[in-house]
Amino acid sequence: MATSRLLQAPGATITGWGVGLPDNIVTNADLAARLDTSDEWIVERSGIRERRIGGTSGSLAVEAGRAALKDAGVDPASVDLLLLATSTPDQQMPATASFVQDELGLSGGACDVNAACSGFVYALVAGYGMAALGAQRILVIGSDVMSRITDQEDRGTAVLFGDGAGAVVLEATDGAGQLLGWDLGSDGSTRHILYADHRAHTKMDGKEVFRRAVRVMVTSSVRALEAAGVAPADVKLVVPHQANVRIIEAACKRLEIPTERAALVLEHTGNTSAGSIPLALADAADAGRLDDGDIVLVVGFGAGMSWASAVLRWAR
Ligand code: ACO
């Protein structure tokens, strides 16, 4: 039976994490000085107060990856696989993962994953899958420099996006590991509501993205929780994609999970696309919000539209 084969496969556990953020902070007041917007509007509509701008997807990924490897105490030369989630690669070709692999001195394979803001969760689930196929140490990074594909004169998008990266180290375990359930999804018929063409800026139908984001966050979370055999009430920490605090609040309300259980960094980072979930996870873990045995729900959505959820039992 497929189920028993899955249960016998090696699992994996997150043993370290790290972040990479540009030094340059751009506040809402900075934006209001040159755009027809205000701190009040941005905070009320999105929850964002400031964002970091600068760097490249590769350089931020290197910073986050290096910190995660150090945190886990893992020798870069012993890493079997790098999965780098990004939709703002430094070059069309090769993958930005090639640069990161070289800079960090990683061994093993390296490739990019593009599922926009859901990319990190896609890569994370794929990482657990690779552990089941025998990989011992996997570096999973989400890194995006959204400022590069955002029209800084467009108040509709410039106020929302920022640059940043987060990384985790996955290590194979003898037992089942910490992944309890997952859900990955895509509805390519809605790809026109959020996109960036080659050498062009991001175009977004904000209201439509908002509406669909809440819906897919809820349905995907429920599917992953059901696969894990876990009730929403048992979730200790939700790590949602950091696009808009109102989207997070609406999704938590529908899931009947108190918003206080959500990890939030978007106030200071804006929407960093694939960087957002590992940034929020690292922040919550560093703040001591996670104990061994806690149930963690990570849930992302983004252009595509794509969505991805995973339910973990925290153990370090
Ligand atoms: N400052 C002031 N006014 C603004 C700004 C701004 N920065 N931006 C838009 N407005 C105006 C609009 O022009 C509009 O004016 P009008 O009524 O005269 O036409 C008014 O404010 C209201 O605009 P709405 O679009 O109705 O505002 P809304 O409450 O929907 O909030 C927002 C807009 C924040 C974009 C919201 O729709 C949203 O967050 N959507 C989801 C975006 C998102 O999550 N994107 C990322 C997805 S993940 C990925 O893959 C990258």
Image (spheres, helix red, strand yellow):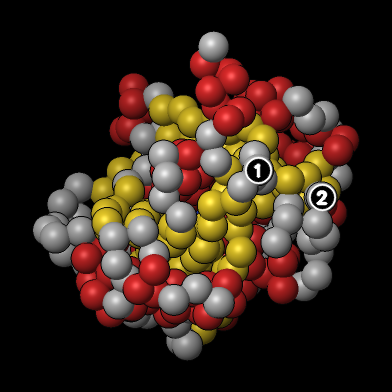
- Number of other residues with Cα within 10 Å of mark 1, as a class: few under 14, some 14 to 19, many 20 or more: few
Where does label 1 land, which residue? 175
Who is closer to the viewer here, 293 or 197? 293
Q: Label 2 is placed on what type of residue?
A: Gly
Marking on residue 293 = 2
- Number of other residues with Cα within 10 Å of mark 2, as a class: few under 14, some 14 to 19, many 20 or more: few
Look at discs 2 and 1 and give the one toward the viewer.
Answer: 1
Residue 203 point in image, percent of width and height:
32, 47
- The vertical placement of 191 against 26, above or below, is above
Is 77 positioned to the left or the right of 36 in the image? left
Q: Please tell me which residue is depicted at 32% across the width and 48% down the height of the picture.
A: 113
Q: Quadrant of residue 190?
A: top left
Is 65 positioned to the left or the right of 230 in the image? left
Who is closer to the viewer here, 284 or 264? 284
The answer, for residue 194, to whether it is visible in the render is yes
- The vertical placement of 182 against 297, above or below, is above
- The vertical placement of 286 against 11, above or below, is below
Q: Quadrant of residue 22?
A: bottom left
Mark 2 → mark 1, Cα distance in angstroms: 14 Å
Q: Please tell me which residue is depicted at 81% across the width and 42% down the height of the picture.
A: 235
Marking on residue 82 = none
Q: Please tell me which residue is depicted at 66% across the width and 24% down the height of the picture.
A: 227
